[in-house]
Image (spheres, rainbow, N blue to C red):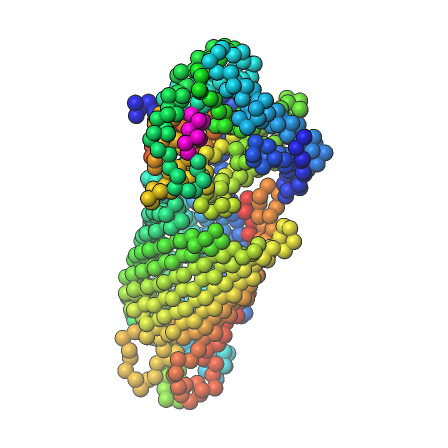
Amino acid sequence: MQLKQLANISAALAAASCAVLGQQAQAGTLLDDWQFNSAILLYNETDRVSAGEGVFTARGDFGDDKYLNLGLVVDALTGASATGAVAQPYVQSFTRPSGRGSYDVAPGDTPLDDTFHDTRVQLDASWEQPLAPNWRVSGGGHVSKEYDYLSLGLNGSLARDFNQKNTTVSLGLAFSHDTISPEGGIASAFAPMLLRSDFADDASYQAAFAATRDRADDTKDTLDLLLGLTQVINRDWLMQFNYSLSVADGYMTDPFKLVSVVNSNGEVQQNLYESRPDKRTKHSLYWQNKLHLSGTFLDASYRYMWDDWELNSHTADVKWRLPLGERWYVEPQLRYYQQSAAEFYLPFILQTEPLPQFASADYRIGKMTAYTLGAKFGTRLAAGNELSFRIALYQQKPENDGVAAPGILADMQLYEKVTAVMAQVSYSF
Amino acid sequence: MSAISLQRGSNCVVGQFRAMASPCEILLEQQDQALCSKLTQLAAQEAQRIEQKYSRYRSDSVLSQLNCHTGQWQHLDPETAALLQFANTCYILSAGLFDISSGILRRAWQFDGSDNIASQQQLDALLPFIGWHRVRLDANQLFLPAGMELDLGGIAKEYAVDKVLQLLSSQFAPDAAPSIVVNFGGDMACNRPRADGSLWRIGIEHPSLADQAITAVGLSQGALATSGDSRRFLLKDGIRYSHILNPKTGWPVSKAPRSVTVAAPNCLLAGLLATTALLQGEDAEAFLQAQQLQYWLVD
């Protein structure tokens, strides 16, 4: 009896329904559908890095709530990035990280390595489907390749709906294995940056340079865990909480960054390649609210992140989508970010002090605040396609974490602001 | 004649009217208001014709007349005979769960959100008058035993959607019809893909978040029908009694999903499968999987 009830009766019923309607049996309902999204992003820091990024994603609906997601990201970066070395009131010479060639930095300028350029291609794929009533599962992977960097990853998630799908609890796990192989190899911790001009000939320079390098490449493994809770508060309010844990093990030093060693008058004696710990455990708490407020949509979120590098950060982000006439909307965005410095962050090392175990002068792990001010304009086109334009101003403001600058450094700009403009065009079809 | 209104959508024209206790709409892909107006008029007339013929609320309907003249053989017009034959097939294929003679259970159950659940005594008094197997049907006549009553509420609206779409398509030369969607309160059908290749995006309502579409599905051809209504239930001693009644016991089906939506070539079939799925209670999803059609289920 049970078997009979669950038999496929749709074919027999289809024939009966066509008889009532006096129709020929029709082809099945066509519902399979692909949704595509494409975007181009241009990012330009004043006098520093410029980046262009193209994103193409596709989501295929295979029926029964089964979806295949595919993504392709191509980005190209070019321009100059801060090396971590301090500015000086005279011309400074730097050797490129590869060991081949050098460049000069003008008096008073923050040292920037202007040969920074890279192209990255990333491919993502994931499959999601129901596992049992109220359970959903997904699995996927990524490959990302740059000239000197390869990242391979796998991820999976499991979600369970409760309370008539008003509550969803999810668990996500991701693992990635990254390999970095910088041109010229990896410098040993605190290896000095050598200058060709200090050597009599190429051979002796090359021999000395090779001695500062101890391996061609290194790896990093990262395990991420995410616990999420999504709750429908009422028909106009959705709330989400996430806790995530990220444990990384491996090479996390930036092979292109330097730390200046200065004397008591603030004069650079030597530039050393930085060194960071090879373990990092990050935690983050995320709280998001999506609200429907009389025809407008408000998305407000807050994230608190802390890690065992003693780098803590707060991020508050508010986006508000407002209708603009019948077809357009405008979505202003304000994002505020604040972080404390990692425990081994030092804007420079004093010659008189013993060399610490780890040190980095990378402003990105120093104390700073940043904000993004932007707006997106979007419109619904015929056939449900959507076109949007986004423009945003992003400013990073590094701050002094109570370090007294000796001698000539007192007159140097050690915490230079970085201002960037982002422009993005997206088209969904 | 019911009042119709026209509205211009972003990529279609919509004609609206009310029939069969539902908001009804005709979506036309072409931005042609005059054509849409004409099609909506035709649709409203056809919907009204079917409503008048099969409504149990109208004493002059064909259905009410059949229910009035029990205990004797009654002649059936071809359309009614075909619908009852279909109901017969549904009864057989659903192993007796889909039964158009079960409507009298309404006398014992009012799903008004209260705690007035029916007593076994009330149900025992009604059950002898329920059971399609007691009804005799041949090619053009029906014998309905005394005390029994038929109710086509489970199929009339879906049937109307298909008939209206057929009528509207027939206004054009073969293969020249534009893409049209007929949507009667969420039960809908579409004749052909849109000329620009895009899909009609249809939201399926989430019963606990009224008006918030849980999923937007793309429809290019064929039909969608939804069964289930979270607003119709009884609650007593913490137990929720759904309005889906098992015609064999007279009791609400337990552990049924709140709502089921099925995609099928026509609306009649989609609706029937959605309703039959709900009648399977906790086996609804297994039943739907066995049908090999796309479905959406809300627990």
Relative horizontal placement of residue B141, taking residue A216 as reference (left or right): right
In the rendered structure, which segment of residues is drawn in magenta?
A: B102-109
Name the residue: 33% across, 55% down.
Answer: A227
Query: In this image, B223 relative to B93: left or right?
Result: right
Give the side of residue A303 with respect to residue A330, left or right.
Answer: left
Left or right of B160? Residue B91 is left
> Along the line of sight, which residue is nearer the eye, A256 or B167?
B167
Q: Position of residue A428 (x, y in %)?
A: 54, 47
Q: Residue at x 54, y 32 (%)?
A: B188
The residue at 46%/43% (across/down) is B206
Residue A141, can we see it? no
Q: Decide whether residue A24 is among the magenta residues.
A: no
Q: Residue at x 41, y 85 (%)?
A: A405
Q: Nearer the viewer, residue B162 or A41?
A: B162
On the question of residue B188 being in view, the answer is yes
Q: Nearer the viewer, residue A427 or B270?
A: B270
Q: Position of residue A289 (x, y in %)?
A: 45, 59
Across and down, in percent, residue A288 comes to 43, 59
- The quarter holding residue A344 reads bottom left
Task: Choose top left, top right, bottom left or bottom right for residue B172.
Answer: top right
